[in-house]
Image (cartoon, grey):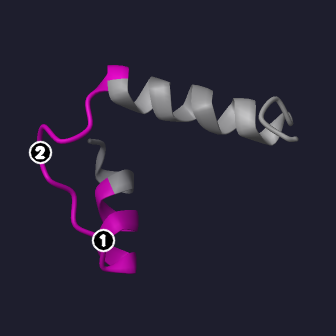
């Protein structure tokens, strides 16, 4: 994690646990959020 990101996390009081989110998981979450935002799951 780059220092700017660490600083942002600290400013908001967030905790980042090493190894919890890897690039594969993050990309899966982003893809799902993009699909939701595009309306693909709307009824």
Relative height, residue 1 to residue 16 (above, below): above
Mark 2 crowdedness (10 Å alpha carbons): few <14, some 14-19, many ≥20: few
State if disc 2 and disc 1 touch (CB < 8 Å).
no
Picture coordinates of residue 43, whole percent (x, y): 88, 41
Using residue 26 as the reference point, say whether residue 16 is left or right of it: left
- 25, 39: nearer the viewer: 39
Q: Is residue 23 above or below residue 1?
A: above
Residue 15 sits inside the magenta stretch: yes
- The image position of residue 37, as x and y in percent, is 79, 41
In the rendered view, does 39 fall on the left or right side of 25?
A: right
Provide the secondary structure element on which disc 1 rests: loop
Q: Quadrant of the N terminus?
A: top left
- Which residue lies most toward the left here? 18
Q: Tag 2, which secondary structure? A: loop
Residue drawn at point x = 29 percent, y = 73 percent: 10
Residue found at the very far front of the displayed protein = 43
Tell me the residue at 14%/53% (across/down).
17
Query: Is 31 part of what is drawn in magenta?
Result: no
* Along the line of sight, the residue nearer the viewer: 28 or 43: 43
In the rendered structure, which segment of residues is drawn in magenta?
Answer: 6-24
Residue 13: x and y in percent read 30, 79
In the rendered image, residue 27, in percent from the top left (x then y), is placed at 47, 24
Q: Is residue 30 left or right of residue 43?
A: left
Residue drawn 34% across and 66% down? 9
Is residue 28 rendered to the left or right of residue 39? left
What is the distance, in whole Å, between disc 1 and disc 2 at their CAs?
A: 13 Å
Residue that numbered label 1 is attached to: 14
Residue 32 position by quadrant: top right
Q: Which mark is residue 2?
A: none
Label 1 Cα crowd, 10 Å radius (few <14 / some 14-19 / many 20+) = few
Q: Which residue carries the number 2 mark?
A: 18
* Viewer-proximal residue among 32 and 22: 32
């Amino acid at each position: 994690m780059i220092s700017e990101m660490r600083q942002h996390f600290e400013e908001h009081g967030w905790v980042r646990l090493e190894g919890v989110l890897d690039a594969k998981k993050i990309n899966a979450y982003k893809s799902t959020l993009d699909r939701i935002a595009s309306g693909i799951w709307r009824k």
